[in-house]
Image: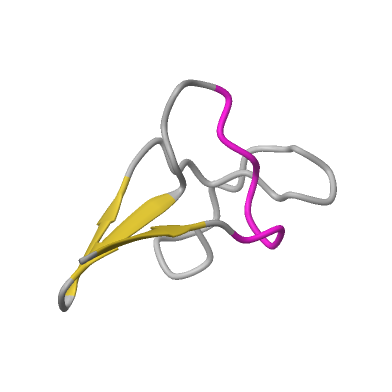
Amino acid sequence: MKKIIYTDKAPAPIGPYNQAVLVGNTLYTSGQIALNPATMELVLDDIETE
């Protein structure tokens, strides 16, 4: 079974894709870049922050 994942805590997709799709126990993400959703600025501090 496939579940489309959407959260307003991440930037909205700007293309024809979903933020994530959950299939069984596997989560597939697409188009996620390190944007701060409040400011829409790119976050480049470190991988954990991104």
* Furthest residue toward top: 15
Q: Residue at x 44, y 70 (%)?
A: 48
Q: Residue at x 41, y 31 (%)?
A: 17
Can you give x and y, in whole percent of width and height, for residue 22 in the image?
28, 65
Task: Name the side, left or right, on which 38 lies relative to 14.
Answer: right
For the N terminus, which image quadrant?
Answer: bottom left
2 and 20: which one is in front?
2
Task: Name the side, left or right, on which 9 lies relative to 38.
Answer: left
* Furthest residue toward bottom: 25
Q: Could you say which quadrant of the image residue 13 lies in?
A: top right
Q: Is residue 5 above or below residue 39?
A: below
Can you give x and y, in whole percent of width and height, for residue 18 in the image?
44, 41
Task: Name the side, left or right, on which 8 lies relative to 3.
Answer: right
Can you give x and y, in whole percent of width and height, for residue 42 in the image?
63, 38
24 and 43: which one is in front?
24
Instruction: Tell me which segment is drawn in magenta.
Output: 7-14
31 and 44: which one is in front?
31
* Furthest residue toward right: 39
The majority secondary structure of the magenta stretch comes to loop
Q: Residue at x 60, y 47 (%)?
A: 43
